[in-house]
Amino acid sequence: MLFIGANVKLDSLDIKILGILQRDAEQQVAHIAEQIGLSATPCWRRIQRLKEAGVITGTVALLDPRKVNVAVTVFVSVRTSTHTQEWLDRFTATVDAIPEVVEFYRMSGDVDYLLRVVVPDIAAYDAVYKRLISGTNLHDVSSSFAMQELKQTTALPLGYI
Amino acid sequence: MLFIGANVKLDSLDIKILGILQRDAEQQVAHIAEQIGLSATPCWRRIQRLKEAGVITGTVALLDPRKVNVAVTVFVSVRTSTHTQEWLDRFTATVDAIPEVVEFYRMSGDVDYLLRVVVPDIAAYDAVYKRLISGTNLHDVSSSFAMQELKQTTALPLGYI
DNA sequence: GTTGAAAAACGCGGAGT
DNA sequence: ACTCCGCGTTTTTCAAC
């Protein structure tokens, strides 16, 4: 049992609820309740608590990338020579304004930043690339294309709670 | 207007609906309807259609990685010397069984596969690493740690429809 | 596409185990 | 802390237009 921040303790029933909602948040509470061996009211209250505590940050619809014409994933490794906070602020602002960038990390090691970009095709990627490098001074940018998406999930592992 | 597969055409209202549901799928249809200037019934019908057509693949709860103790993201680049289908099948099976791996791509270029792994700390990553390399024969594995998550979204860009 | 109404599920309280 | 009960309210869902 892990205590997080201001007294949010998660027991095995909470973990089961999280596991279920992470896969499908459309089920009704009564159905979730019976899966974990509980009646609807306490199950409903637990879900409320998990939302208030910020464990559940939101519930969203997931779209098929192919159906919305962004089937191509590109990973962009960025190196910079200017390691100031204001440079990062500016780069972050640039990236935030580009909806094609769906993930953006500051990395350890030889690459400074890593971005995941989704686009319909190479031509569209080139446009994104130009937007990226026009915003700030980047020392080195290298793009790797994903040929196949073998696994992709929003469900986090729950074994470390 | 883009036609996808077997006659799924998405107009600007559909795109607005997708944009809304991608950010927050908990709103009631009446509320979505008024945002796009429609009454509840046709809006509800459009959402059904988008689900049946597979544009919306599901609705899930998103969790705070820190609150479930997987705040550390590691990118794992894998090179292999055996490029057979059965090797890939086996590697895929290995990866699928590891819940810490949340993304898994086959790449072009010098890296063959790229994985995103979420864990609580370096020690936990070492355990995942050992599971990864024990399953199959990997020629070269290199791990990069994310120091900071600057952007992370499940919302796909809707401008290419 | 609209309006309106039935059916279902939610939200929340209370008493008891 | 959960169960069972219940009831008003909201929301979904499906008529008919």
Image: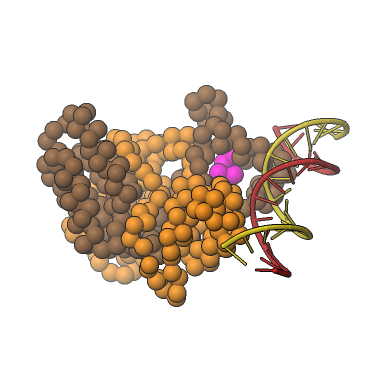
Chain colours: A brown, B orange, C yellow, D red
Q: Residue B87: x, y in percent?
A: 32, 65
Is residue B130 visible in this depiction of the protein?
no
Q: Is residue B135 above or below residue A16?
A: below
| Residue A131 can be seen in this image | yes
- Please report the residue visible at 36 percent of the width from the left and 46 percent of the height from the top: B117
- Residue at (22%, 62%) from the top-left corner? A122
| Magenta-span inclusion, residue B88 | no
Position above or below: A13 against B133: above
- In depth, the one of B74 and B160 nearer the eye is B160
* B28 sits to left or right of B54: right
Residue D15: x %, y % from top left: 72, 69
Q: Which residue sits at x=55%, y=53%?
A: B33
Viewer-closest of A97 and B98 = A97
Q: Nearer the viewer, residue D15 or B8?
A: D15
The stretch of residues the image draws in magenta is: A14-18
Indicate the quadrant where residue B97 lies: bottom left
Tell me the chief SS of the magenta region: helix
**Side of B75 relative to D9 (left or right):** left
The spot of residue B14 in percent (x, y) is 46, 60
In this orientation, which residue lies closer to the viewer: B110 or A116? A116
| x then y, percent, for residue A2 | 52, 31
